[in-house]
Image (spheres, rainbow, N blue to C red):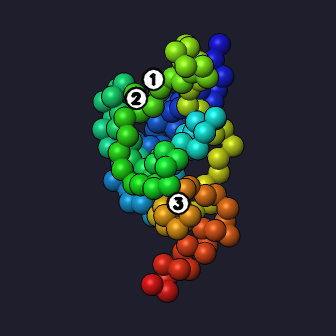
Amino acid sequence: MSHPAYELTPPEILRKLIDNRDKDWEEKPVVKIFFPMGSATWLLISITDDTPGEEIAYGLADLGFGSPEIGYVSLKELRELRFSLLPGGPGTLRLERDLYFEPTHSLQAYTLAAWANCHIVEDPKLIEQALNAEEVA
């Protein structure tokens, strides 16, 4: 049996993402997906195409290169990603869903903070700083 964290979009999460289809980035993210051995992280807010097995999600992506961005991602591709700890070894690591993620701010706030800090941050102080800087600008 697989660990629940490996199920990136269980039915209740998938339903919330679909329900958010027509909402904007002022909503809170629904799910956080991350790579446990690195800094790649996705905060997803909605699904724009809910074709079973081919869902396209919208949210904030940070691949760990210092330039987080808003955009679309294939949930199928995220589910299928596998990583190896050894060059040429079997792909044994995969992305996980943060089972304890409780969003405190809107996707817009997370995005502004990520752009200000060059990576996704969850520290409420850093998020508030980014929001305050946006208000001043």
Viewer-nearest residue: 66 or 126? 66
Tell me the amino acid under the disc marked 1: Glu
Distance from Cα at disc 3 to Cα at disc 2: 24 Å
Instruction: Name which residue type carries label 2.
Output: Glu
Q: Please tell me which residue is depicted at 60% across the width and 19% down the height of the picture.
A: 86
The image quadrant where one finds the N terminus is top right
Relative to 46, say whether 125 is above or below: below
Q: Amino acid at mark 3?
A: Cys
Report crowding for label 2: few under 14, some 14 to 19, many 20 or more residues within 10 A (C-alpha): few
Q: Which residue is mark 3?
A: 118
Query: Measured from the top left, where is residue 85 in percent x and y?
Result: 61, 23
Element at label 3: loop
Q: Is residue 109 visible?
A: no
For the C terminus, the quadrant is bottom left
Per the model, the C-alpha gap separating discs 2 and 1 is 5 Å
Q: Which mark is residue 77?
A: 2
What residue is drawn where x is 41% and y is 33%?
75
How far apart, in angstroms, are the residues tagged by discs 1 and 3?
Answer: 27 Å
Image coordinates for residue 104, horizontal then vertical, percent: 62, 60
Mark 1 nearby-residue class (10 Å; few <14, some 14–19, many ≥20):
few
Residue located 61% across and 58% down the image: 121
Pair 3/2: label in front: 3
Q: In the image, 137: left or right of 40?
A: left
| Marks 1 and 3 in Cβ contact (< 8 Å) | no
**Residue 43 location, x and y as percent?**
51, 48
Q: Secondary structure at mark 2?
A: helix
> 86 or 121, which lies in front?
86
Q: Secondary structure at mark 1?
A: helix
